[in-house]
């Protein structure tokens, strides 16, 4: 009989309001921890996907630069780049400037054309 009374007392303590509230609080805390862990996992997955995308873009850019470097490493590539960037010409070649009808007025007054005209005038003046 005493065993029965002890069980009843234990049941009464376990199902009391403070014990139930404590159990609900602990369960909600555990659930909150699981949600935070899941949210962190999703965020990490998002960051990994973004970093993979950046790595792919960097690899493409590196391959592009490597191709440009290999082209510039040849004498034809170097000559083409020098002609394009610095407007260089080989001895005996002449520079020809084509002016469009719409663009003629703007490019005729541009610095490059004026500089070429000035340079031609200076060469004539000095007798070259």
Image (tube, rainbow, N blue to C red):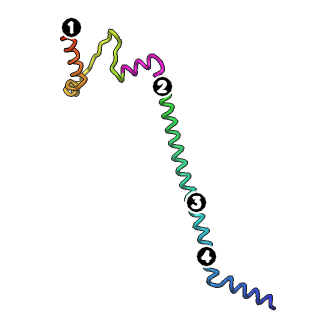
Residue on which disc 1 sits: 127
Q: Earlier in the sequence, mark 4 or mark 2?
A: 4
Residue 119 appears in which quarter of the rendering? Answer: top left
Distance, label 1 to label 4, CA atoms, is 102 Å
Is residue 103 rendered to the left or right of residue 66? left
Which span of residues is magenta-colored?
Answer: 69-83
As measured in the structure, the alpha-carbon distance from the residue carrying label 2 to the one carrying label 1 is 42 Å
Instruction: Single out the mark in the foreground, 1 or 4.
Output: 1
Regarding mark 4 in the picture, which secondary structure is present there?
A: helix
For this rendering, which residue is in front, 20 or 111? 111
Question: Which residue corresponds to the image point at 62% horizontal and 78% vertical from the top-left?
Answer: 22
Chief secondary structure of the magenta span? helix
Q: Quadrant of residue 76?
A: top left
Report how far apart the C-alphas of labels 1 and 3 lie in the structure. 83 Å
| Residue 104 position in % (x across, y down) | 21, 25
Q: CA distance from mark 2 to mark 3?
A: 46 Å
Closer to the chain start, of discs 1 and 4, is 4
User: Going from the N terminus, do you reach mark 3 or mark 4 first?
Assistant: 4
Q: Which residue is mark 4?
A: 24
Residue 75 is labelled as: none
- The residue pinned by badge 3 equals 38
- What is the x, y in percent for residue 85? 36, 24
Residue tagged 2: 69
Q: Quadrant of the N terminus?
A: bottom right
**Residue at the spot 59% in from the left edge and 65% down from the top edge:** 33
Disc 3 and disc 4 in contact, CB within 8 angstroms: no
């Amino acid at each position: 009989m005493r065993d029965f009374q002890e069980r009843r007392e234990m049941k009464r303590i376990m199902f009391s309001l403070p014990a139930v509230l404590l159990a609900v609080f602990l369960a909600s805390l555990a659930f909150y921890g699981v949600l935070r862990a899941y949210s962190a996992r999703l965020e990490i997955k998002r960051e990994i996907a973004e970093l993979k995308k950046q790595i792919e873009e960097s690899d493409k850019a590196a391959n592009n630069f490597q191709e440009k470097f290999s082209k510039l490493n040849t004498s034809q590539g170097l000559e083409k780049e020098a002609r394009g960037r610095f407007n260089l010409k080989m001895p005996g070649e002449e520079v020809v400037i084509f002016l469009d009808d719409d663009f003629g007025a703007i490019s005729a007054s541009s610095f490059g054309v004026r500089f070429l005209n000035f340079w031609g005038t200076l060469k004539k003046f000095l007798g070259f």
